[in-house]
Image (cartoon, rainbow, N blue to C red):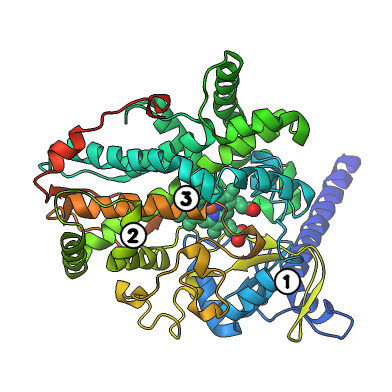
Amino acid sequence: MFSYIFVLSYLSVYSTCLLIFIAVCTLAFLLSPFVLRKFIMDKDGHGIPPGPNIRYAFLRKYPELALDAWAKQYGPLFSIWMGTQLFVVLSDPHVARDLLVTHGSVFSSRKKYFMKNQMILNGRAITASEYGDRWRQHRKIAISVLTPKALQGYSQVLDYEAHILIRSLYEETLHGKRPVNPAHYSGRYALNNMLSISFGTRTVSALDPLVEKALDLAMEFMDLTGPWSNVVDFFEPLQWVPTTTRSRGRKLHDDLITVYGSMIQQVEARMKAGEDVPDCLVKTLIQNQKQENLDWEDLCMLSAVFTLGGVHSTSGIIQWFLALISSNPEIQRRAHEEMDRVIGQDRWPTAEDEKSLPYIRAIIKEVQRIHAPFWMATPHCTSDDFSYHGTFIPKDTVIVLNCYTLHHNEERYPDSFNFNPDRYLGDNLSCGESAKLANVMDRDHWAFGAGRRICPGLPIAEQELWLAISRLLWAFRFEAVPGEPISLDEYEGHSGRTPIPYRLGFIPRVNQLHSLLEMRQETALFNLL
Ligand code: HEM
């Protein structure tokens, strides 16, 4: 009896002590930024950039709004702790250029995010690779299929997919009689372009199960890999705890290997059988596998990355365009007026017409400014200590490009919350050219990131957006459905944001539309080339 009471009181003292210990550790952990801000400094005594003295597990639904508020409070260069990780946020064009471009040798790595870079991509797929030779090698291979010459080779494919996009919408809307949600069609358009470039193939109907599968994989990737989607990325001890999110990450990794691995095997089989496989990323990878020392996971992840990075982004911008244009009748009227004046109704616009349709080009840039798919781009990471204008940015700091604040800089974009394509009239540069301008305040927008990691898919994304948006404008008048207002304020998804699903009327506005669309049918890609 005595020993029983003794054990009970011992346990109660033990658990009280344990609770106090946990409480003290938690408090110390939460309050440590006060101390760390004073003690982390460079040799000249410069501390880290200012910022809130709190730690965040993750920023909730609209993190860009929190970053914007902090940028206003702490300035263009501020810092926050997410769990154990220090973040520095860049909210000014000059600071972004100085650090990401001019000092790109220090500011171009990636943090080993547990979920994205370890569980799902296993350090591969370019976007997950740390700055160094392997990243250089993989990016070089990917860029080899995105050079201007290579893009010339795909021009027929892009043109054809834009044709099929308009045709599917025309058919699905029963020639304008029934409103549709454009998400599936813009998604398939972007997907087919990426499948052609990556695998030399395409889906032959909107019902092809690969459409749903590939879009789901890309959506799951976006959901799981936002800059602060997962608390496990910032509290290392949690990496040992089995959770549903962890299982989702593992499953996504396995699904990517299964789906894209089997597509690689199909291309390989066709090459072995002596078929004339169109030039594509996988063909390049297979031909150079030995020489470049690429293992099976390299192959799978590299071939998957275009469909992961280039589908929801491009499709989202098309969806935002449709939402914005139908909510702004005067802008739609001016776009149609320009189209009818320059192109007329006998033919539709092609890639060559871009320079002669400045208002429509301006609309596309303005959509990307006002609803960039990635408000925080893809965070970079420092590979060395760096001192900048009296502040210290230590090695392994995650660097966030705060596109939301950059895109609402009132000096650069007056009345920045207003959708106003006029602000881009007179800007005749492509986004790629604009990113290289000497005066960074003249850069069009930051939707594709900056510096050595800038999106390598930029040139093809611009071509895709041009063909889809200019032809949509040529073919249809867009009408919101009565009683179904389209929300321009809300989003869904943590990263790669698309609008809340909506339905829209696509009213044919050109007599020749039917006969023009009939000229091309759905076909497998290799029949095309
Ligand atoms: C409108 C469409 C697109 C947008 C807004 C977009 C945006 C971005 C952004 C913000 C980054 C991070 C840049 C940085 O770290 O500074 C990125 C990286 C990347 N994008 Fe895109 N992207 C788009 C389309 C594409 C397409 C079509 C492809 C493939 C053909 C692609 C492939 C990639 C890859 C591989 C990376 C990783 C680059 C690296 O880490 O070195 N993206 N993209």
Q: Is residue 385 left or right of residue 88?
A: right
Crowd band around label 2 with a 10 angstrom C-alpha radius: few (<14), some (14–19), many (20+): some
- Answer yes or no: is residue 495 visible: no
Residue ID for mark 2: 354
Q: The C terminus lies in which quarter of the figure?
A: top left
Checking the image for residue 349, the label placed there is none
How far apart are labels 1 and 2 at the CA level? 34 Å
Q: Position of residue 477 (x, y in %)?
A: 15, 54
- Would the CB of label 3 be found within 8 Å of ligand 1? yes
- Answer yes or no: is residue 96 visible: yes
Residue ID for mark 1: 103
Q: Residue at x 87, y 44 (%)?
A: 7
Q: Earlier in the sequence, mark 1 or mark 2?
A: 1
In-front residue for pair 264/172: 264
Q: Position of residue 215 (x, y in %)?
A: 44, 38
Q: Is residue 476 above or below residue 389?
A: above
Tag in front: 3 or 2:
2
Q: Residue at x 47, y 60 (%)?
A: 61
Q: The N terminus lies in which quarter of the figure?
A: top right
Task: Describe the element under mark 3 as helix, strand or loop.
Answer: helix
Residue ID for mark 3: 460
Task: Describe the element under mark 1 as helix, strand or loop.
Answer: loop
* Circles 3 and 2 in contact, beta carbons < 8 Å: no
Q: Earlier in the sequence, mark 1 or mark 3?
A: 1
